[in-house]
Amino acid sequence: MLEHCAHARYVWNLAVEQHTHWKPGRKAAPGFAEQCRQLTEARRDSQWLRSGNADVQQQALKDFAQAKSARFTSGFGEPTWRRKFRHEGFRVIGTDRVPEFEPDGSPKLNAQTGRQIMGRSVVVQKLNRRWAQVKVPGCGWVRFRLTRAELPQAKTFRVTFRNGQWHIAFAVIPQPVDAPGTGETVGIDRGVTITAALSDGRKLNCPQLTTKERAQLRKHQRRAARAPKNSARKTAEYARAARLKAREANRRKDWCEKTSTMLARTYDLIRFEKLNITNMTASARGTVEQPGRKVRQKAGLNRAILAQGWGLLRQRTEHKAPGRIEDVPAPYTSVRCSACGWIDKKSRKSQADFACVSCGFTCNADENAAVNVAAGQGGIPRPRRSAGAGGTTAATGRASVREPQPTRVGIPLC
Ligand SMILES: [Zn+2]
C-alpha cells in the first residue's frame, strides 16, 4: 500500500508540475484525458510505474482534475505538491460491476443502446460486527474496523496513512438528517471557555488534551528541539508529538460530528453567530518597525480559538441540515439583555456573569448570548424559550415595563 501511495504521489506531482510550469505561449495545460494518455506512455517507458496498479495511478489524475476544477469553491485553492510521509494516500476504484439505478428507483438506461448502465462498486465483506474486509489491488483482502452498522455502498474508496495509522474512507455522501418538525429554534454562542453555549441552557465543551497529555506533548517537543540535527531521536520525538496532536484533532472531530448530528436531529432551525475566524485568529506580530503588543498572549488565544473547532462544527451542521442554518451578526449578542433587549456593556459583569442594568435579569453570559442568537439579533423581540432563563428574571413585567427602548435611542445594532 505504501508503494501505491508512492505511485499516486508521483503521478499527482507530475500533474501539478504540468500545470504550474505552463507557459503563456503554449496551449492550455493537458486535461484529464490527455494526462491519462500520457500516463499510458509513461507506464510503457518506466519499469517502476508499470509495476504499480494502473487504476490507482489514473485515480490520482482524476483526484487532481477534481481538485483543479474545485479550486475556487473547495477552500483549498490550487492543488499543490504532495510530500512523502505527509500526504500518503491513494484512491481505489471498485471492481465489482453492478447495475445502476436512477434516484427514483428505475434502472438507469444507456440512451443509445437502451441497456442498463453497469457501474462500479467496491468489493467489501463483513466479517463480524466489528470488522470487515475490502479488496485492495495488489494487496488482496485488507481488514478494517467497521464503524457503521451496514457495509458501505460506494464506487470508490480512499486509503490514507497518517501518523503510523492506516485509514479507509468510502466515497458516500450521506443523506441529510431530517428535521424533527417541532418548529424549535436554537441559538449557539461559541466561546473559548465554553465551546458552544446553547439557548436551551446546555453548555457543550469540545474535549481537549488532558493536563497529563499536554505535559507529555511539551516533553516530546522539548526533547525533539534539543536532539542533534537529522538524528533518529529527533524524528522519533517529533513523531510522538505529532501522534498526540493527532489524538487531539481526532477528539475534536469526533465531538464536532456528534454535536452537529445532535443539533440537526433536535432542532428545525439552528442559528450561529457569524464569526470571521480568519480575522479573529490573525497574528498580533506586526512589523519589524512596529512590533505588535502581547504577541505571545494573542498566539495563545489564537491556538485556543482554533482548538475549539468552531468552523468545523458550523460546517458539519450545515452538511447535515442544509437550509436549516442561519448566521446571525455577532455584534451586541453578548451585551444585549435577552429578557428586555437593553444593550449595555455594563450588563456583562464578568466573563461568566450577565446582570442587566435595566431590568435586573441575571443569567450566564454565554447562555444570554445564545438566547440572543436564537432570537435573531438584538432589537427583534425574542420568543420565550423553554428553560432559557437561568436566574431571577423580570419576565412578568416584560411587555409593560419597557422603559429603555434600545432600538429607538440610536444604539447601532449591527
Ligand atoms: Zn434586561
Image (cartoon, grey):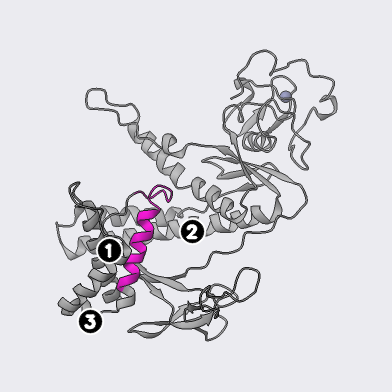
CA gap between label 1 and label 2 equals 30 Å
State the SS at label 2: helix
Q: Which residue is mark 3?
A: 51
Residue drawn at the location 65% of the way across and 26% of the way down = 336
Is residue 388 positioned above or below 30 on the image?
A: above
Binning the other alpha carbons within 10 Å of mark 1 as few (below 14), some (14 to 19) or many (20 upward) gives many
State the SS at label 1: helix
Q: Which residue is mark 1?
A: 12
Is residue 149 positioned above or below 313 on the image?
A: below
Residue drawn at the location 35% of the way across and 29% of the way down = 294
Q: Is residue 284 left or right of residue 118?
A: left
Residue mark closest to the camera, 1 vs 2: 1
Q: Which residue is mark 2?
A: 251
Closest to the observer, 102 or 214: 102
Name the quarter where the N terminus is drawn.
bottom left
Q: Is residue 332 left or right of residue 389?
A: left
The quadrant of the picture showing ligand 1 is top right
Closest to the observer, 192 or 3: 3
First to last magenta residue range = 57-77
Residue 126 coordinates in the image, percent (x, y): 53, 84
Residue drawn at the location 68% of the way across and 56% of the way down = 265
Amino acid carrying label 3: it is: Ser
CA gap between label 1 and label 3 equals 17 Å
Amino acid carrying label 1: it is: Trp
